[in-house]
């Protein structure tokens, strides 16, 4: 779950990563509220997994992502909160730090710091309290001719608050204007809890819910070529209606893929 895993284009792939059916051997705390029922682990077919850890009051305090267990490749993210319970920063064991700034109750800016130096930041635009777009800017340029405006994302929602679509924009190197790149449309939601939403929120959107429920269809459109790819998802649930498994099927560009992942809870 490295930084680039959390951007929009890789998030499409994250939702499609095949997942492991191995026995979950995470060390679980005693089943006590408010930790009980929270997501503990997602296991992948490759042997990779994400483990989540919480404070006694239920706040997320650490995510350990093991990308390649054989090689021992992993990254750990830690979370700091203020006395009001708002996230103030996320930092990892590879020198990256994300600092959160708020305006009232709304997230205003998230800055990325590497070895203590602010390298870029993301700003947020709201309409009646609903997040509608984000803009990313560079704070450190490799040369004076670089654009400080890096990218833009726009969002639309269904009436129930679930994400309907998101569109990514690059920046034209000459004009500096946004250029539409990819649109992802989500549909056919179930009415069950979405355990993957936390990974959509990280690292720039912590506290903003994109997916209350699970979208069973995603259509990814390349805005430059017009080519669309369809991703279908099916879920199984436990007696508490929490998702236990997620199976995906991918149809596009003459390819067909499928895979299943497993969720474990405290």
Image: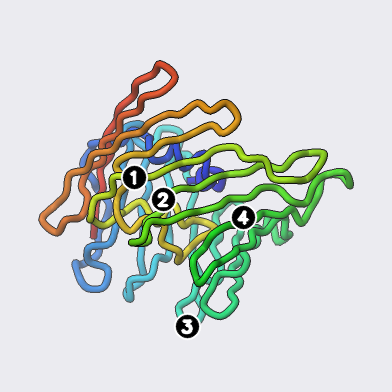
The disc placed on residue 187 is: 1
Rounded to the nearest angstrom, the CA distance separating label 2 from label 4 is 31 Å
Tag 2–tag 3 contact (CB < 8 Å):
no
Q: Residue most toward the left?
A: 239
Sequence-earlier tag: 1 or 3: 3
**Does residue 146 appear to the left or right of 260 in the view shown?**
right
Q: Whole-percent x and y of residue 160?
A: 33, 61
Q: Residue 164 bears which disc, if any?
A: 2
Foreground mark, 2 or 3, reads 2
Residue 69 rendering spot, x and y as whole percentages? 40, 37
Q: For this view, does 146 lie left or right of residue 212?
A: right
Location of residue 166 in the rendering, given as x and y in whole percent from the top left corner? 50, 48
Seen at 58% across and 74% down, the residue is: 102
The mark that comes first in sequence, 3 or 4, is: 3
Whether label 1 touches label 2, CB < 8 Å: yes
- Vertical order, 60 against 180 (above or below): below
The residue where tag 3 is placed is: 84
Q: Are marks 1 and 3 in contact (CB under 8 Å)?
A: no
Residue at image position (45%, 48%) is: 165
Residue shown at 80% from the left, 47% from the top: 147
Q: Point out the tag, 4 or 1, that comes first from the N-terminus.
A: 4
């Amino acid at each position: 779950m490295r930084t680039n895993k959390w951007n929009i284009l890789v998030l499409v792939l994250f939702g499609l990563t095949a997942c492991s059916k191995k026995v979950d051997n995470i060390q679980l705390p005693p089943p006590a509220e408010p930790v009980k029922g929270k997501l503990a682990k997602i296991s992948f077919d490759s042997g990779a997994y994400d483990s989540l850890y919480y404070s006694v009051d239920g706040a997320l305090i650490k995510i350990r992502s093991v990308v390649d267990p054989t090689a021992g490749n992993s990254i750990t993210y830690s979370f700091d909160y203020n006395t009001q319970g708002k996230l103030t920063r996320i930092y990892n064991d590879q020198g990256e730090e994300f600092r959160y700034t708020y305006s009232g109750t709304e997230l205003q800016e998230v800055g990325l710091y590497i070895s203590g130096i602010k390298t870029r930041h993301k700003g947020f635009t709201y309409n009646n309290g609903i997040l509608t777009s984000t803009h990313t800017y560079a704070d450190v340029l490799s040369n004076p001719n670089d654009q400080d405006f890096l990218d833009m994302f726009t969002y639309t929602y269904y009436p129930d608050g679930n994400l309907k679509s998101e569109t990514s924009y690059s920046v034209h190197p000459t004009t500096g204007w946004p250029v539409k790149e990819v649109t992802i449309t989500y549909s056919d939601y179930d009415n069950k809890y979405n355990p993957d939403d936390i990974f959509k929120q990280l690292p720039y959107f912590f506290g903003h819910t994109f997916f209350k429920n699970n979208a069973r269809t995603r259509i990814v459109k390349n805005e430059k070529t017009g080519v669309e790819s369809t991703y279908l998802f099916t879920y199984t649930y436990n007696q508490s209606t929490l998702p236990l498994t997620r199976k995906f099927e991918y149809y596009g560009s003459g390819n067909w893929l499928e895979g299943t992942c497993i969720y474990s809870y405290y």
